[in-house]
């Protein structure tokens, strides 16, 4: 598929500055989106990044400048967001001049889990007057509840509805989230698969060891979306290892979550291998050498909304690793639903199905499966697929409805 040329030029707004290398969550998504759209993005306007990630974030992406509206210390944004918005309002004329000078004809805003960022987006859009495309990643109302933000839910809902209804186009990271937004606010939300521009590995045969120990690899943060499923996976692996299986299985967690927190949440076990703070090269090596890549989602009823609307960026590393993927989660959660829709193997949607799935990995461990992953990437996650969706979206003319 050849990427079409877009008839407009984007100023890309993001609350997570694009990571030059590594990073996680929206930092990765911002980098992937910018790489995919290429020359169609002429300027990056980013929310002030936290000091702890500032050193590894871009100041340029290609030939595009990246400007941060550093109108207040980053810590104030979470502690006193209204003050930061007031300061942004005072400085938005300068930001407006930068966006106008870039030649941008549309705004594309990537919004993470902080509902206050929508207010920043609205302030910027109202200043420059360009059509606004919104891309939502996490349910804002539920994220605020989990972060124990003090703002009442009615206010979050009102702010979100206000901004979404003034956007030209609304995108969501999963089909479930698009349907949720459409039903909640009466807007026409559309699924926009996140782009995966990392190079795909060819098929890697399993690394054989003596004794025969095989790793089920999970890469990413250990948080509420995954932790109960990881505990269940570890319990199934321990049961497997206590039986008469001809080989031993280890759950390998590659994370930036502190090791002591991983052990506290998942458990201590001889069947668990935790590695923290790996560089990009070592991370990819462990994924290539794994028996299979584990993509878990929680079965907890309290997580239903989040797992059905979010779509983990961990799929990026999994689909490009050259190894089989074992998806584990309820059928309503986004990644298992995606794999079921694509009729891909090793998709477990019941808690008691994980043990039997371990016996199926070897049968699916073929170059043909990796070729199917490659076809999926080209169909939904390639730069060409992203550009085609942006071209075909409702209201593509550049005028605000």
Image (spheres, rainbow, N blue to C red):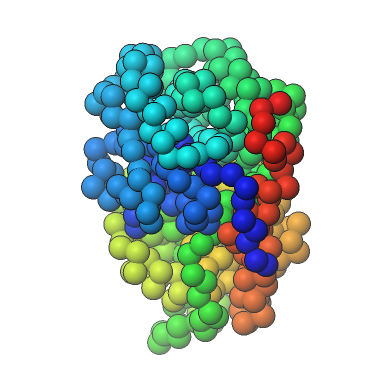
Which residue is depicted at the point 42% across and 64% down?
252
Which residue is depicted at the point 39% across and 73% down?
285
**Seen in the image, is 108 located left or right of residue 66?**
right
- Residue 231: x %, y % from top left: 49, 51
In this rendering, the answer to whether 238 lies above or below 157 is below
Q: Nearer the viewer, residue 356 or 282?
A: 282
**Seen in the image, is 139 located left or right of residue 338?**
left
- Residue 159: x %, y % from top left: 56, 17
Q: Is residue 214 visible?
A: yes
- Residue 16: x %, y % from top left: 40, 40
Q: Nearer the viewer, residue 15 or 274?
A: 15
Q: Is residue 224 visible?
A: no
- Residue 141: x %, y % from top left: 56, 24
Tally of numbered discs: 0
Quadrant of the rendered structure where residue 88 is?
top left
Which residue is depicted at the point 45% across and 85% down?
208
Quadrant of the drawing holding the C terminus: top right
């Amino acid at each position: 598929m050849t990427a079409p040329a877009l008839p407009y030029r984007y100023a890309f707004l993001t609350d997570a500055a694009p990571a030059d290398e590594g990073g996680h969550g929206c930092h990765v998504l911002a980098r992937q989106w910018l790489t995919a759209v290429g020359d169609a993005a002429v300027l990056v306007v980013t929310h002030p990044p936290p000091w702890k990630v500032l050193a590894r974030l871009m100041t340029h992406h290609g030939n595009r400048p990246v400007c941060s509206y550093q109108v207040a210390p980053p810590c104030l944004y979470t502690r006193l967001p209204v003050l930061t918005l007031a300061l942004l309002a005072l400085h938005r004329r300068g930001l407006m001049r930068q966006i106008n000078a870039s030649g941008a004809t549309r705004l594309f805003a990537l919004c993470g889990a902080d509902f206050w960022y929508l207010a920043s987006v609205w302030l910027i859009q109202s200043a420059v007057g360009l059509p606004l495309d919104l891309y939502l990643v996490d349910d804002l109302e539920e994220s605020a509840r989990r972060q124990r933000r003090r703002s009442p839910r009615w206010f979050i809902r009102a702010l979100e509805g206000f901004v979404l209804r003034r956007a030209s186009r609304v995108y969501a990271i999963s089909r479930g989230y698009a349907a949720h937004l459409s039903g909640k606010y009466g807007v026409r939300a559309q699924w926009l698969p996140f782009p995966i521009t990392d190079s795909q590995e060819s098929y890697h045969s399993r690394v054989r060891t003596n004794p025969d120990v095989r790793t089920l690899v999970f890469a990413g943060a250990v948080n509420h979306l995954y932790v109960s499923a990881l505990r269940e996976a570890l319990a199934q692996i321990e049961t497997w290892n206590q039986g008469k299986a001809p080989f031993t299985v280890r759950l390998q967690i590659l994370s930036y979550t502190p090791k002591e927190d991983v052990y506290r949440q998942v458990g201590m076990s001889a069947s668990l291998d935790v590695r923290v703070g790996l560089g990009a090269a070592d991370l990819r090596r462990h994924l290539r050498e794994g028996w299979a890549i584990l993509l878990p989602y929680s079965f907890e009823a309290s997580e239903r909304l989040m797992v059905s609307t979010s779509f983990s960026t961990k799929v990026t590393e999994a689909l490009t690793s050259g190894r089989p993927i074992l998806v584990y989660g309820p059928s309503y959660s986004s990644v298992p639903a995606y794999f079921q829709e694509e009729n891909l193997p090793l998709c477990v949607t019941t808690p008691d199905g994980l043990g039997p799935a371990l016996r199926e990995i070897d049968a699916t461990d073929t170059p043909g499966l990796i070729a199917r992953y490659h076809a999926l990437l080209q169909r939904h996650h390639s730069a060409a697929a992203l550009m085609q969706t942006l071209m075909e979206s409702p209201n593509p003319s550049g005028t605000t409805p």
